[in-house]
Image (spheres, grey):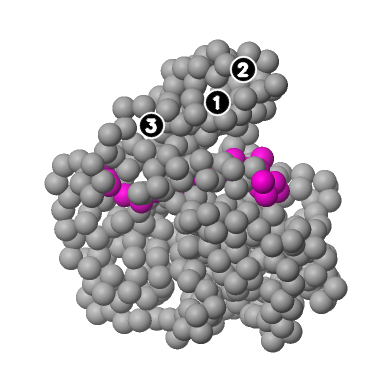
Amino acid sequence: MIDEETIAAIVHKISRKSFSHDVGRAKGKIKQKPVWKKVRDLGTRFWLDTGDIDEAKKLWCSEFEALTTNNSLLNKEVQKGIYDELIRETANAIDKVAQNIDEHLLILEIAFVLNAYHALKLVDMFDAYVSVEVHTDLGHDIERTVSYGKRYYDICPERFYVKVPLTPAGLLAARKLGQLGVPVNFTLGFSARQNYLASLLAQPAFVNVFMGRLNAFIVDNGLGDGKNVGEKATLATQRELLRLRKAKRTHSLLIGASMREGSQIPALGGVDIFTMPPKVAAQYEKKPLEELSPQIELDPAVTLNESFTFKDLRIETLWDIPSDFRKTVDHLLEDNIEELTPGAIRTHFVRAGYSDFLPDYSEDDIQMATSDGKIPVYDNWKNKLSSGEIGLDALMNLTAFCSFATDQSALDNRIRSLL
């Protein structure tokens, strides 16, 4: 029988190897950049969306507070070969106490070390808060997401946030982690209604709108110019969270994620948090605006090409929260939440007429989403979108999860090649 507690202890020790950071102190002098202070004065906080230390060094300043990694960003670092020796070391250490360990479990543990070890390097260099993400294989497993999420947090409780993906199981796992005192970055959100449910049921520290991918979906599929799609969804979500926080119904903050252009920064001034790829941060530094103002009440217009309508795309699912949807969430919260299952959550929305919200995907759907990559191919989904079988927010969530799983698989394969 495998002693998972012993394995966890070994993994914890290896993850923290050589880490002796003085929390509150970054390595070297951190410069100030007034260009970012102006935006911070609107109430927005700044994170960098990268796991690349050299990239982060070029931009990091005292106005930034966090870095966020994910399966794709970590895979880029691991594929450089810089952690091959760490992979072998971890495998050998685990093999000494569990010689017959299942390969899948071994890979999960090594991937955990890679994520935690790299995140600690970011903490050590920048004294930053860092988001670490659970393995995609755990996206539909409440118990193991909670277990690994708590273990991540215990590696560095002073600086780690734990990323959990938006799935029915993720909603419940994020809630349980929060109850254990773990700050959760609830990722892969694309709409106001997704985050309305997440902020009330899961109560994570942070929710997300992946705005850049929304704009890219419109552009890449020739549906329109893509302008304001992600921005409209982000601002609608921010207004809703402000209302819920004022009513003391949630404490969740919004992360404007997947930013693509420096111009989005002033256009979304006042959003709780931006997590910016280095390219976006550098663009804004070169062309900052002198005059800034809060944009939260802005509701920008979205236009499509003449041959497409909002109904064709179910695009309104990105920013609308119908009153009936709110009531559906309220009714769910009246149940015994601690006994809810992922299937019960999905069924609850289906019975309320929102089968498009948390669809029960077929294997063909998953294979199609995986084949599409980050951005869905509209022609593959247009019938399901227009019929209301799937909402655009749900589709974007599915393809995002599958694209992260693809990159996670590439990372896992590198581990496997070294065993």
The label on residue 6 is 1
Residue type at numbered disc 2: Ala
Q: CA distance from mark 2 to mark 1?
A: 9 Å
Residue type at numbered disc 1: Thr
Q: Secondary structure at mark 3?
A: loop
Residue type at numbered disc 3: Arg
Residue 106, quarter of the rendered image? top right
Viewer-side residue, 92 vs 415:
92
Q: Per the image, is 134 magenta? A: yes
Give how far across and how far down residue 257 sits, in percent: 47, 60
Mark 2 and mark 1 lie on one chain; the one further toward the N terminus is 1
Would you name the residue on which mark 2 appears?
98
Vertical order, 293 against 419 (above or below): below
Q: Secondary structure at mark 1?
A: helix
Image quarter where the N terminus lies is: top right
The residue under the point 55% across, 59% down is 179
The residue under the point 61% across, 29% down is 4
The label on residue 16 is 3
The label on residue 196 is none
Tell me if label 2 and label 3 are in contact, CB under 8 Å.
Answer: no
How many residues crowd mark 1 within 10 Å: few (<14), some (14–19), many (20+)?
A: few
Tell me if label 2 and label 1 are in contact, CB under 8 Å.
Answer: yes
Q: Which residues are magenta?
A: 125-143
The residue under the point 59% across, 43% down is 147
Mark 2 and mark 3 lie on one chain; the one further toward the N terminus is 3
How many residues crowd mark 3 within 10 Å: few (<14), some (14–19), many (20+)?
A: some
Give how far across and how far down residue 373 sits, in percent: 64, 47
Vertical order, 226 against 104 (above or below): below
